Every structure is written in C-alpha cells, then in structure tokens.
Amino acid sequence: MASKKTLKIREKREKRTRSKIVGTQERPRLSVFRSDKHIYVQAVDDTQSTTLVTASTLCKELAKNIKNKKKVDVAKEVGKLIAERLKARGIDKIVFDRGRFLYHGRVKALADAAREKGLKF
C-alpha cells in the first residue's frame, strides 16, 4: 500500500500530465491504468467523451496466453491487443496518456508493444 505522500505525488503528476493531453476521433487518447495485478488501457475520444476501444488483462482473449507470465510480458500482450483493435477500427495515430504512472516497466512495455504493431504516438 502506498503512503499518503506517494498518493499525493501521483495525483499531482496525473493532473499535470492530463492537462496537456486531448484525444480526438482521429487521434484518440490512449489512457493506461495499472494496478498491482492487472493493467488496463482504453482509447478515449475527449471531444465526445466516449471510449472507443478497451483492452486489459481481464480480456477473455488474453486469459489463456498470460498464465504464468511476468507482469511486463503481460503488459506487452495487452499493448499488442489494443493496437490490433485500434487498427481494426482504422485508427493508427494516438496520443499516449500514462496518467500518474512513470514511463517505465509495464507502462513502457505496453507502449513499445503497441508501437511494434504499428501505432504512431
């Protein structure tokens, strides 16, 4: 469990990061959230306040592929899945929103996997 000081720092970082990022229909915001066990990502159109595509470790498509894998490897799988889903909708450019999480570890692995599948940040 994170301390109150750590939580305040994360909230401050989230506000600072999200204030500069806006997603549109052509270039949605790819928002990442990671918990201790899972990682979630969604493509958001901020102009209409709608979620276009989602992927997470809880998806049925990934459930059989991620057993007994490390968290970083699972994040890579989620990154590939979200890229495939966005490509199917005809979207290849996004704005990456790491939120309150630092760009390393699982967040970086997810972003790199999405780039490998053809998304442009």
Image (tube, rainbow, N blue to C red):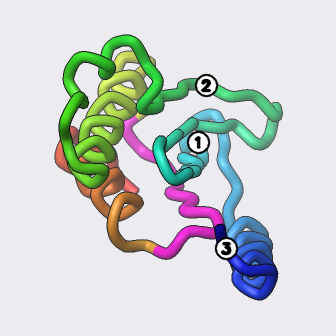
Describe the element under mark 3 as helix, strand or loop: loop
Q: Which residue is mark 2?
A: 52
Report the Cα–Cα distance between label 1 and label 3: 30 Å
Give the residue furthest to the top: 60
Up-down: is 121 above or below 104? above
Q: Which residue is mark 3?
A: 2
C-beta proximity under 8 Å, tags 2 and 1: yes
Q: Position of residue 13 (x, y in %)?
A: 70, 79
C-beta proximity under 8 Å, tags 2 and 3: no
Which of the two discs, 2 and 1, labels the residue nearer the N terminus?
A: 1
The residue positioned 31% from the left and 21% from the top of the image is 62
Q: Position of residue 16 (x, y in %)?
A: 74, 78
Q: Amino acid at mark 1?
A: Pro
> Quarter of the image holding residue 42?
top right
Report the Cα–Cα distance between label 2 and label 3: 31 Å
Q: Quadrant of the C terminus?
A: bottom left
Up-down: is 107 above or below 89? below
Describe the element under mark 2 as helix, strand or loop: strand
Which of the two discs, 2 and 3, labels the residue nearer the N terminus?
A: 3
Neighbour tally class for label 2: few under 14, some 14-19, many 20 plus, Cα within 10 Å: some
Q: Position of residue 81 (x, y in %)?
A: 32, 28
The front one of 68 and 93 is 68
Which mark is in front, 2 or 3?
3
**Span shown in magenta:** 92-102
